[in-house]
Image (tube, rainbow, N blue to C red):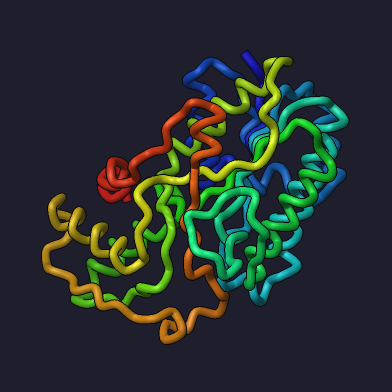
């Protein structure tokens, strides 16, 4: 049994991580922004000084992609400085850190499925701050695993699946971009992966530190993803009318932040290294819809 600090414990992944840790018999410090501001190094150091923590799982993130264009300093503080301070504290305590990053680092004009060894690039503030977070962890911590996840959805928090259902209830037609491809990732198996990795990293013989892609399969474009979501919603009697999903281009949608056109990820490294399958996201869709 370990004592695990979960940062971002009220979010859609962090809340699942918290639940899974308790189910497996671990003790948890469930930290939300109201109890631990990871962008303040003195707060991070204080909690490490007052408690003997065995591992850290960082699910905290600034994820408002478009708003980040106007709130760069806030996004940088949470997505870059927070991981930096956690990494330093983990190194000092000689304990493992599991951190969730993003597929936005693959906005590099290369076609997916992307692999971890590629040259990275991102054209939005959110992606840049998450990339700095990765950099700071690799520079300041020895025992870390970073999981690059994409298009996360689950019953808790805000996400694309819940947004499509909410909009579909009020409209007969939705316009969704068709030139963005990626991999939807259900929150529960991602949380399970984080917990399992933290447990394995507590073994002194663990040697598989590094960066891994983790996402659901199969890949899909945003427009088709919306159609699948709304089809499931109709089958579950969550919608009382048909909703037409019309394809548009991202340049016509007018979002403030530039998103990757193709952020499909290869999970071969993760599967091979840890002998663990990645989820079929369609198997988790109904749970999210019915609990939305």
Would residue 96 be visible to someone looking at this image?
Answer: yes
Q: Nearer the viewer, residue 14 or 253?
A: 253
- x, y (%) of residue 121? 66, 65
Quarter of the figure with residue 240: bottom left
* Residue 173 versus residue 112 in the image, above or below: below
* Residue farthest toward the top in the current orientation of the protein: 1
Question: Taking 202 as reference, is 103 left or right?
Answer: left
* Number of numbered tags placed on the structure image: 0
Question: At 53% across and 54% down in the image, what residue appears?
Answer: 114
- x, y (%) of residue 5? 67, 31
- x, y (%) of residue 52? 78, 21
- x, y (%) of residue 154? 40, 47
Q: Nearer the viewer, residue 106 or 228?
A: 106
Tell me the quadrant of the picture where the N terminus can be found: top right
* Residue 291 versus residue 105 in the image, above or below: above
Question: Taking 240 as reference, is 215 left or right?
Answer: right
Question: At 50% across and 39% down in the image, what residue appears?
Answer: 268
Q: Nearer the viewer, residue 68 or 203?
A: 203
* Residue farthest toward the bottom in the current orientation of the protein: 252
Question: At 67% across and 57% down in the image, what residue appears?
Answer: 130
Would residue 162 be visible to someone looking at this image?
Answer: no
Question: Taking 46 as reference, is 201 left or right?
Answer: left
Question: At 58% across and 61% down in the image, what residue appears?
Answer: 106
């Amino acid at each position: 049994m370990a004592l695990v600090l979960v940062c971002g414990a009220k979010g859609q992944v962090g809340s699942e991580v918290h639940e899974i840790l308790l189910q497996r018999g671990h003790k948890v410090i469930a930290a939300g922004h109201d109890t631990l501001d990871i962008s303040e190094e003195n707060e991070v150091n204080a909690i490490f000084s007052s408690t003997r923590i065995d591992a850290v799982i960082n699910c905290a993130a600034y994820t408002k992609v478009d708003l980040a264009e106007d709130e760069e300093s806030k996004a940088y503080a949470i997505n870059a400085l927070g991981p930096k301070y956690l990494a330093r504290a983990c190194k000092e305590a000689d304990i493992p850190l599991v951190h969730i990053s993003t597929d936005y680092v693959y906005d590099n004009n290369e076609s997916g499925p992307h692999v971890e060894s590629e040259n990275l690039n991102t054209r939005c503030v959110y992606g840049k701050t998450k990339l700095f977070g990765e950099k700071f962890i690799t520079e300041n911590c020895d025992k870390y695993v970073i999981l690059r996840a994409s298009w996360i959805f689950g019953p808790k928090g805000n996400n694309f699946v819940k947004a499509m259902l909410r909009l579909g209830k009020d409209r007969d037609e939705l316009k969704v971009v068709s030139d963005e491809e990626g991999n939807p990732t259900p929150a529960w198996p991602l949380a399970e992966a984080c917990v399992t990795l933290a447990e394995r990293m507590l073994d002194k013989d663990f040697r598989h530190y590094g960066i891994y892609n983790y996402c659901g399969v199969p890949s899909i474009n945003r427009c088709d993803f919306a159609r699948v979501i709304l089809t499931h919603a109709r089958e579950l009697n969550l919608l009382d009318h048909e909703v037409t999903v019309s394809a548009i281009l991202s340049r016509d949608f007018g979002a403030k932040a530039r998103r990757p056109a193709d952020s499909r990820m290869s999970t071969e490294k993760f599967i091979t290294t840890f002998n663990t399958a990645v989820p079929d996201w369609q198997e988790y869709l109904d749970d999210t819809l019915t609990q939305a």
